Image (cartoon, rainbow, N blue to C red):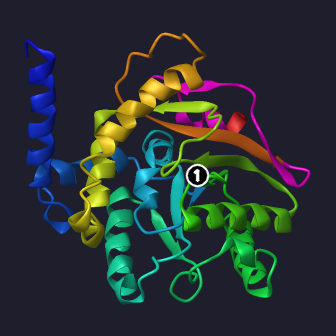
Amino acid sequence: MKSFLDYAKRLESLAKEARAIEGGNSLASEDLALSKRLLGRGADDDAKKVLIFSPHPDDECLVGALPLRLCSECGCRVRNVAVTLGSKKLRRISRFEELKGACAFLGWGLTVCGECGFESMNACERGSESWNACAGEIASIIRAENPAAVFFPHEKDANNTHMCVSMLVRDALGILGNFGGAVVTTEYWSAHDAPNMMVEVSPEILAALVCALSFHRGEVERNDYHVRLPAWMSDNVRRGAELVGGQGAQKPDFEFAVLYRLGKFENGEIRFSKKKRLISNSDRADSIFTA
């Protein structure tokens, strides 16, 4: 490669080639081997638990870099909690099947809220009987699992369901009153105002997440966002270098990352850590438990 024009054309060509790769149950043997290689150690009986509260099927993959590192490197047990199965009732059964395939590939447990996911939510219903019932169910899940960390969208994640799930989990934590684990807010549709943690993503972890996303076949067929996940993670390095590392900071020596906001739930509210963390592949991912 001798010019930036070559670079741009190569990127365009790679994206087109990637769209032709078979996903889901038709993954290449090299991709299927990723799951066994990353998760081969398995979890101990007393392993720490991690819960991901996902607004839609596929969100577990989009924000799952740190949970997958916790699972792969530290033996944590990860469980995805599907808060909804999407707004289209005719797609819910197929989306559930796709979700089961994605979670199985990642080695994660799966819980679905309600009978078939919660119905479409609206923030104006917050505090209503039906809303409080949903928050109560989430509180029961957290109480039963007693996780070392919970992941859920930040309050301004620019998608109605994402923002409602953020409020629901916050209300659920309020019902519990005490939660000693780490609270980690995620971003996808809209960036955090003030992320305090940048987590390096290796090519293997990134590829595993793309593979898992490819199980959501009905979604990626209409929008090939799974092959664009590397571009998003690359841009996160640009943002995180200064938002987490500090203005004018040198870019870290890696290519892919995800940004999060880490905190604790104390005295009825989330108190986010003032400490900025850059967790490279040489660092232990479970350092978040000592926030």
Q: Nearer the viewer, residue 107 or 225?
A: 225
| Placement of the N terminus among the 4 image quadrants | top left
Residue 150: percent from left, percent from top: 64, 54
Residue 122, visible in the rendered structure: yes
Would you name the residue on which mark 1 appears? 47
Residue sitting at x 86%, y 57%: 178
Q: Is residue 136 magenta?
A: no
Residue 219: percent from left, percent from top: 30, 68
Residue 281, visible in the rendered structure: no
Residue sitting at x 47%, y 48%: 71
For badge 1, the amino acid type reads: Ala
Please identify the residue farthest to the right as the structure is shown. 267
The image shows residue 250, relative to residue 102, as above or below, that is above
Q: Locate residue 35 relative to residue 113 in the image: left or right.
A: left
Residue 64: percent from left, percent from top: 46, 50
| Placement of the C terminus among the 4 image quadrants | top right
Q: Locate residue 247 relative to residue 142 in the image: left or right.
A: left
Residue 55: percent from left, percent from top: 53, 66
Q: How many marks?
A: 1
Residue sitting at x 26%, y 54%: 211
Instruction: Place residue 207 in its image quadrant.
Output: top left
Count residues near mark 1 (Cα–Cα under 10 Å), then give few for <14, some for 14-19, many for 20+: some
Instruction: Place residue 91 in its image quadrant.
Output: bottom left
Residue sitting at x 49%, y 42%: 66
Q: Nearer the viewer, residue 164 or 207?
A: 164
Regarding mark 1 in the picture, which secondary structure is present there? loop
The image shows residue 246, relative to residue 273, as above or below, that is above
Q: Is residue 271 magenta?
A: yes
The image shows residue 10, relative to residue 266, as above or below, that is above
The stretch of residues the image draws in magenta is 266-288
